[in-house]
Image (cartoon, grey):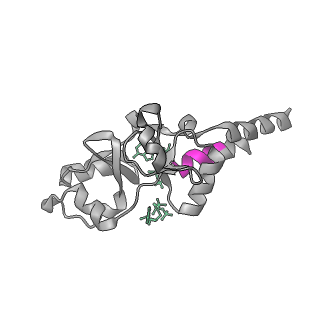
């Protein structure tokens, strides 16, 4: 019976896709690219407890960067610099993944890209013009809009461990 449980777990993992395990956009702690890093906003970020904070411009489904909490250590709150400035300085690319990508592929992406967070994007018919930007081999795309959530290495590992 135990073997059966294990086997079911493995199948579950193989059949699951990004949107099954991602953190949905409504629940993602994010900051606006125009936010000024004052004492108060830096404190809010630390209080969130997250290491990686997606940065949006104009609307939350338009992610333009990832802010690393540890990169705030050197920020002087009295300068009140814009989040945009920190992003430009550290230049970390946002890596996007389609929300229907199977987890075994996502796991491989994490292993080869050395990042711990991917931004999940939903592709629908009204976004047909994006199709040219989809890298089918890599399950990634270039457009900033259409973000529906985030997925981290931890979200995938949890599924892998469940399957063991
Ligand atoms: P680390 O453990 O490397 O410090 P972390 O604790 O910030 O990172 P993860 O361990 O990668 O985050 O992920 C833990 C959970 O939190 C996952 O479910 C992930 O989707 C979620 N998560 C990560 N970053 C955020 C965020 N900015 N807002 C909301 N949820 C997040
Ligand atoms: P680790 O505990 O492995 O150092 P981390 O918390 O620093 O993880 P990761 O998302 O795992 O954050 O990124 C690994 C390292 O690569 C970090 O030092 C981060 O600053 C850097 N990094 C993240 N994304 C990119 C990227 N797209 N391009 C270049 N460097 C990146």
User: In terms of image quadrants, where is residue 155?
Assistant: top right
Against 123, residue 47 (above or below) is below
- Residue nearest the viewer, comparing 81 with 15: 15
All told, the count of numbered labels is 0
- Which quadrant of the figure has residue 78? bottom left
Residue 62 picture location, percent across and down: 33, 43
Left/right placement of residue 44 relative to residue 160 reads left
Q: Look at the magenta stretch and give its main secondary structure.
A: helix
Q: Residue at x 41, y 32 (%)?
A: 126
On the image, the x and y values in percent for residue 42 come to: 25, 53
Q: From the viewer's perspective, is 57 left or right of 51?
A: left
Quadrant in the picture for the N terminus: top right
> Quick check: 15 above or below 78?
above
Say whether residue 154 is magenta.
yes
Q: Give the image quadrant in which the ligand numbered 2 is located.
A: bottom left
Q: Quadrant of the C terminus?
A: top right
- The foreground one among 149 and 124 is 124
> Which residue sits at x=43%, y=52%?
142
**Is 37 on the left-hand or right-hand side of 22?**
left
Q: Nearer the viewer, residue 126 or 29?
A: 126
| Residue 28 placement (x, y as % from top left) | 39, 40
In this picture, which residue range is highlighted in magenta? 152-159
């Amino acid at each position: 019976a135990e073997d059966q449980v294990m086997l079911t777990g493995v199948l579950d993992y193989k059949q699951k896709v990004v949107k099954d395990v991602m953190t949905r956009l409504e629940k993602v702690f994010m900051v606006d690219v125009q936010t000024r890093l004052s004492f108060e906003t830096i404190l809010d970020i630390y209080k969130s407890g997250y290491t990686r904070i997606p940065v949006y411009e104009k609307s939350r489904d338009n992610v333009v960067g990832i802010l690393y909490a540890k990169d705030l250590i050197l920020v002087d709150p009295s300068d009140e610099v814009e989040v945009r400035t920190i992003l430009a300085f550290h230049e970390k690319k946002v890596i996007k993944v389609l929300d229907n990508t199977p987890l075994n592929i996502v796991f491989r992406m994490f292993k080869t890209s050395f990042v711990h967070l991917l931004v999940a994007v939903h592709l629908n018919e009204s976004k047909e013009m994006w199709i040219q930007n989809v890298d089918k081999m890599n399950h990634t795309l270039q457009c900033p809009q259409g973000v529906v959530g985030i997925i981290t290495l931890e979200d995938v590992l949890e599924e892998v461990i469940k399957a063991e």
